[in-house]
Image (cartoon, grey):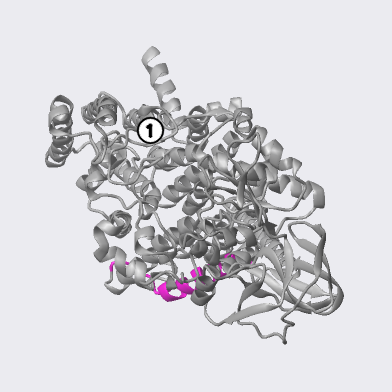
């Protein structure tokens, strides 16, 4: 009677485990454990990217409170740049924005990881994979160390893009299996949510994988492996879903499209002699962070090359010695996952979809090699649309946990089914043992002799540094080998016990999932370097330099020569000619690359009143401010606007830059204007200009001139964004001195307004939100009808 009761309890327990309710609760629990410090104690990542973002957030908050509108222009970085198209102001769409703003960072990231895992779970269920293997695949994708590394690095946009990818893939998979209208609407919504991540590179990689999936289905259909007569029409349905998503995300992507044509990712550099920037960035820039093929071993042993490199942290966190410049994440997703995928192939011949996943995984690896496999990367770089606008080829590895997570889940499913049948194939069992014991022997060899057969030193490191780092690297290396041995021996023992009927397949599945979680938790824990949120704010404490600068009420810019790539001063509302952003206006980038800021005349026209440097400036026009070491005042700084009568009309951007940098050019007396088509200008032009008011979206000036002339405004030229009006009449704005703007003013008093164009942006926002509502409403009706029909079928 007792045995019967125990068997009944065990049966109930196993039945409960094999339910969606259990799987979903486990995913949530694991995410809560991984992110508990962020979720429950409101801790955040103090990464450099997070810190660099804080001045931009502060500026945006203050402007919106003061003017109750979105700032279209930012004056604090790089002398000014558009805020929407350059992602200074990020529009995540209403749904993503709600997730990002309603909760603390930990809960936000937790929701995104849950979305990622749940998407893979439902996809696996669609593939007829049983409950426990589906949970295995979901956990692999949800808490892969790459995701946690992104959290710690402050790269939330990538996490959003990765999280929605399984849902996009699921929508497309549904399109191949009817549910046409529902599939199109679902694809439109999920693709829009991913596009709203505002990370085009991850979105691009997503669609590379999807396009290859359609191509695979098409070829499979041609050779008779798949029998889908509607393969062509399915492609049209996918296009419809994608086009629908593009309508939904017209805001913000219209601004992005405008900006990229003038950015250093879209416009050609006049300094480029290779013509590579005609369509994107240079090869050397695009292939930064190409993954060295020899580092593939780190997919089995995550600490083999030191895992990560955070230069602002302790030496244990700068242990990476692989081939990339540095790394703040790992592409490791679990040795158990790889071996489950291999076991799946040993037990059962892969079907067409599994072959697609294997080949896709290989292609992803090859693309991530970048310059190390140029025979594949070069055609993509030179011929694939938009591909040359990106860098960091290894970023595509963020999708390996998706392909391998599904393969691992299928492998675990095959293993459990194989054991359940009871008719054990000895040959297959031997193959499984060979795979496991081969890697165990390799691991033991590394563990015992790794100190003598591995160097642990990166070329170019100093002796003092390398010895200290080498000891840390050996320690991490041995930790990785011990972890691998534990996981391999434990998993093989569990499989043996299941084969010999000592445990059930359900228990085997739980053990394998537990080992996976232990593995990923240990690696993830090495990335979690958190701090209290208020400690981030302490990095922006005002000092005597900022206090001095803020006392000067004039309109001016600063040149932080010793810390050019910093947004720090923007936190206090100080306008800098430097800053940190991954993308800038092309003309401005060319001026930087041409060493333009070493030219005093360029600093004069950029309204740079103060140069901040601890170095000595040997130029009498720059005087050291008394009682302040490190602040030099520019005595020849030009005002925010001035009037001149002499111009030089140029017809090319290269001529514009070269003339501006010429030693003979004096911006206070003349101007270099690109493609001037205005009327004649009085050579003795004189006059005064007063700025009545100025904010990010509008500048009001009054000019008084007896001669008329060219009014040069020390604000950055950006054709798509700004309009100019003199006494209510719109006038052309000219690109002046390569990066500034000017207008031709008449004789007498003129009321001048520079206004950022927003009417078309408002219309685009209306179109975007309306289409989103229609999609959600349509999905709701279809879902309700489907449920209603299911109830009718059940009643019959």
Determine whether, in the image, residue 484 is placed left or right of residue 177.
left
Residue 501 visible? The answer is: no
* Residue 540 or residue 92, whichever sits in front: 540
Q: Above or below — where is 63 with respect to 645? A: above
Q: Residue at x 20, y 46 (%)?
A: 346
Q: Position of residue 600 (x, y in %)?
A: 57, 58
* Residue 688 or residue 343, whichever sits in front: 688
Give residue 72's quadrant in the image.
bottom right
Q: Residue 545 magenta-drawn?
A: no
Q: Quadrant of the N terminus?
A: top left
Q: Which residues are magenta?
A: 225-247
Q: Above or below — where is 552 with respect to 783? A: above
Q: Position of residue 378 (x, y in %)?
A: 30, 67
Dot 1: element:
helix
Residue for badge 1: 520
Q: Quadrant of the C terminus?
A: bottom right
Q: Above or below — where is 779 with respect to 316? A: below
Q: Residue 246 magenta-drawn?
A: yes
Q: Position of residue 722 (x, y in %)?
A: 70, 69
């Amino acid at each position: 009677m007792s045995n019967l009761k125990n068997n009944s309890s065990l049966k109930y327990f196993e039945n409960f485990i094999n339910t969606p309710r259990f799987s979903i609760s486990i995913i949530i629990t694991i995410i809560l454990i991984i992110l508990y410090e962020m979720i429950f104690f409101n801790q955040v990542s103090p990464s450099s990217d997070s810190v660099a973002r804080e001045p931009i957030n502060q500026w945006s908050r203050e402007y919106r409170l003061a003017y109750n509108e979105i700032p279209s222009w930012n004056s604090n970085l790089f002398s000014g740049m558009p805020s929407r198209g350059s992602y200074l102001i990020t529009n995540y769409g209403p749904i993503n924005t709600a997730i990002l703003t309603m909760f603390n960072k930990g809960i936000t990231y937790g929701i995104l990881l849950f979305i990622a895992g749940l998407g893979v779970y439902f996809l696996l269920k669609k593939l007829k994979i049983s409950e426990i293997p589906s949970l295995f695949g979901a956990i692999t994708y949800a808490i892969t160390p790459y995701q946690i590394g992104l959290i710690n690095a402050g790269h939330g946009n990538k996490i959003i893009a990765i999280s929605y990818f399984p849902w996009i893939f699921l929508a497309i998979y549904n399109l191949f299996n009817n549910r046409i209208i529902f599939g199109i609407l679902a694809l439109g919504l999920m693709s829009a949510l991913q596009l709203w991540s505002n990370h085009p590179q991850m979105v691009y990689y997503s669609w590379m994988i999807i396009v290859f999936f359609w191509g695979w289905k098409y070829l499979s259909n041609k050779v008779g492996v798949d029998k889908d007569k509607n393969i062509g029409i399915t492609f049209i349905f996918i296009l419809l879903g994608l086009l629908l998503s593009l309508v939904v995300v017209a805001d913000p992507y219209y601004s992005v499209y405008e900006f990229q044509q003038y950015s250093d990712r879209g416009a050609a550099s006049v300094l480029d002699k290779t013509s590579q920037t005609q369509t994107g960035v240079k090869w050397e820039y695009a292939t930064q962070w190409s993954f060295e093929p020899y580092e593939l071993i780190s997919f089995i042993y995550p600490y083999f090359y030191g895992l990560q490199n955070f230069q602002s942290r302790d030496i244990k966190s700068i242990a990476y010695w692989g081939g990339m410049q540095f790394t703040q994440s790992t592409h490791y997703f679990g040795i158990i996952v790889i071996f489950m995928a291999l076991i799946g192939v040993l037990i059962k011949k892969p079907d067409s979809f599994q072959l697609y996943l294997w080949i896709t995984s290989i292609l992803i690896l090859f693309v991530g090699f970048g310059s190390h496999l140029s025979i594949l990367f070069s055609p993509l770089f030179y011929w694939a649309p938009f591909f040359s606008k990106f860098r960091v080829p290894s970023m595509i590895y963020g999708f390996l946990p998706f392909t391998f997570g599904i393969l691992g889940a299928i492998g675990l499913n095959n293993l459990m089914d194989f054991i359940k049948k009871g008719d054990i194939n000895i040959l297959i069992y031997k193959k499984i043992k060979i795979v496991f014991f081969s890697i165990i022997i390799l691991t033991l060899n590394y563990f015992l002799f790794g100190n003598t057969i591995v160097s642990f030193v990166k070329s170019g490191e100093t002796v003092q540094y390398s010895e200290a780092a080498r000891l840390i690297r050996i320690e991490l290396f041995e930790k990785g080998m011990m972890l691998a041995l534990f996981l391999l021996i434990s998993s093989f023992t569990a499989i043996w016990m299941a084969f010999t009927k000592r445990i059930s397949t359900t228990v085997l599945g739980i053990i394998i999932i537990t080992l996976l979680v232990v593995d990923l938790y240990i690696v993830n824990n090495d990335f979690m370097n958190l701090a209290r949120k208020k400690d981030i704010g302490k990095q922006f404490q005002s000092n005597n330099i900022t206090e001095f600068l803020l006392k000067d009420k004039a309109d001016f810019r600063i040149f932080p020569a010793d810390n050019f790539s910093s947004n720090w001063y923007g936190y206090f509302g100080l306008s800098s000619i430097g800053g940190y952003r991954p993308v800038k206006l092309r003309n401005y980038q060319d001026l930087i690359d041409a060493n333009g800021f070493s030219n005093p005349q360029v600093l004069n026209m950029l309204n740079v009143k103060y140069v901040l440097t601890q170095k000595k400036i040997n130029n009498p026009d720059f005087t050291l401010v008394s009682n302040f070491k490190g602040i030099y005042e520019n005595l020849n700084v030009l005002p925010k606007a001035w009037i001149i009568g002499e111009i030089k009309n140029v017809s090319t951007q290269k001529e514009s830059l070269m003339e501006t940098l010429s030693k003979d050019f004096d911006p206070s007396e003349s101007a270099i204007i690109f493609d001037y088509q205005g009327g004649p200008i009085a050579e003795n032009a004189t006059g005064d200009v007063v700025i009545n008011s100025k904010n990010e979206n509008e500048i009001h000036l009054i000019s008084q001139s007896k001669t008329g002339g060219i009014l040069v405004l020390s604000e950055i030229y950006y054709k798509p964004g700004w309009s100019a009006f003199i006494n209510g009449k719109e006038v052309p704005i000219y690109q002046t001195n390569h990066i500034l703007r000017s207008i031709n003013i008449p004789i007498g008093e003129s009321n001048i307004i520079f206004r950022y164009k927003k009417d078309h942006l408002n219309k685009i926002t209306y179109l975007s939100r309306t289409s989103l509502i229609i999609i959600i409403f349509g999905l709701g009706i279809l879902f309700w009808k489907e449920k209603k029909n299911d109830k009718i079928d059940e009643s019959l």
